[in-house]
Amino acid sequence: MTTTAITNIASLVTNDPSLGDGSPLGLILDAAVVIEGDRVVWTGESRKAPATDNAVDAGGRAVIPGFVDSHSHLLFAGDRTEEFNARMSGRPYTAGGIRTTVAATRAATDDALDANVVRYLAEALRQGTTTFETKSGYGLTVEDEARALRIAARHTDEVTYLGAHVVPPDYADDPAGYVDLVTGPMLDACAPYARWVDVFCEKGAFDGDQARAILTAGMAKGLHPRVHANQLTYGPGVQLAVELDAASADHCTHLTDADVDALAQGNTVATLLPGAEFSTRADWPDARRLLDAGATVALSTDCNPGSSFTSSMPFCIALAVRDMGMTPDEALWSATAGGAAALRRTDIGRIAPGARADLVLLDAPSHVHLAYRPGVPLVQAVRQRGERAL
Ligand SMILES: [Zn+2]
C-alpha cells in the first residue's frame, strides 16, 4: 500500500498525551503525519519523518483530528424559520413546534429525507466533521421511525433510536400506551438499524421511570444507551444515564452537585450542546464545573430544525470558549476526542498510529484560531479515511 506524508504542519493536535508536548492535546510543532490506506501510521516532528511514496505540503497550517459530532437529528423534513424568528423577535408563536417537524417528516418521501441528510452532511464536512451520530425521533410511528433509521444507516454507523423523543399527538391521552409501543413493536422494527437507544428524559417528555423502561428495553435488544438529560430543568436523567453506564448524557444544562459527582465518578460522558442554548436564548451549561470535577466533556451540535439548527462544530467551540468556561484546548479536545468517547470509539478523534486517517487542515497556524476567529470558514481541506473529501 502506498504511504503519503503530510509535511510542514505548523501545529498538529494528536490528542495522544504520549506524543508531543505531553498535554492532553499531544501537540507537536513543525510536524508531519504519515498515512497508509485509511490509517495513520506515523506522527512526529517533520525532520524525523520516514521516507514515503508521496508527500503533501500543508503550507504551515494547523492539522487537527476531524470533528466527531456525537449528537444530531438529521432525519427531518421542513424547517422552523418562523418559530425561530418569532422567538428571537420577542413575538408570541403558537404554531406546532416539534409537531410541525413530525408532520413534515411523516409526509416526506424516502428520497427527500435521504437528500436532507446528504445536504447537512456535506455542510458539516465543509466545517470539518468526519464522523457524526444521528437519530430518529420525528416519525414517532413504527413505520416512520424504522424508515428514518434505515436511511440514517446508509450514511453512518452511529445510528440512534429515539422513538422516545416526545409523546406524539396521536398518543396525547395515552402516554403509557406510547411507552409500550416504543419498548415493543417500534423497538423490534428499529433495533436492526441502530447501535444506540436514546430517550428525552425531561418534564413534558418522559419521566425517570419511563426513561428507565425505554433504555432497558433497548439494552435487552442489544442497543447501547445514551440520554437527553437535564436540558430544561433538573431531573433524574443524568443519574439514570450513569447508573445504566450510558455512553453519554447529553445537554447537562441543569446539574446538581450529585449529578456532577455521578458524571465525574462514572464512565458516562457529559455532552454539551451550546447551539441549543444559543438558539433558545437559554442559560449556558457550565463546562468549567464539570471539567474541574473530573468529568469527561464532549461538545456537539445537536443539529435539528427546532432548537439548534447548526451543523458547525467550530461554532460550538467558539461558544464553549466564550461562554462556558472552556479553554480553547479543552474545547478542541471535547469536539474531537470527547465526541469519540461519547460514542465509545478509540479509532477516531485522534491522530496517532492506528487511528483512522480523518484529518482537518485549518487555514490558520493553530487550532486556537477556531475560537479566536469565530464564524470564519477556516477549514481548508479534509481527509476522511485517508482520502481527500474536501
Ligand atoms: Zn438532541
Image (cartoon, rainbow, N blue to C red):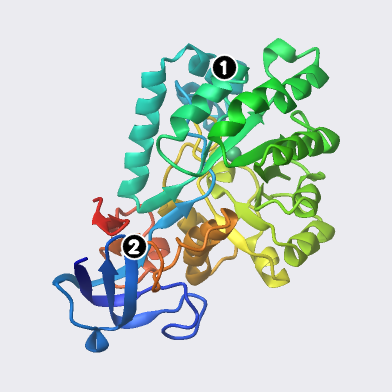
Identify the disc placed on residue 357. 2
- Residue 212 placement: quadrant: top right
Marks 2 and 1: CB-CB under 8 Å? no
Of the two numbered discs 2 and 1 on the same chain, state the one appearing first in sequence. 1
Q: Is 320 in front, or is 117?
A: 117
Residue lying farthest to the bottom in this orientation: 47
Q: Is residue 88 placed above or below 236 in the rendered structure?
A: above
381 left or right of 139 in image: left
Total number of numbered discs in the rendering: 2
Residue 189 horizontal/vertical position (percent): 61, 24
Mark 1 falls on what kind of element?
helix
Q: Residue at x 71, y 41 (%)?
A: 219
The residue that appears at 80% across and 48% down in the rendered structure is: 240
- Relative image position of residue 249 (x, y in whole percent): 68, 50
Instruction: Identify which amino acid the numbered label 2 is placed on.
Output: Ala
Badge 1: residue crowd in 10 Å (few <14, some 14–19, many ≥20):
some
Q: Position of residue 191 (x, y in %)?
A: 61, 32
User: Which residue is disc 1 drawn over?
Assistant: 143
Q: Quadrant of ligand 1?
A: top right
- On screen, residue 259 above or below 47: above
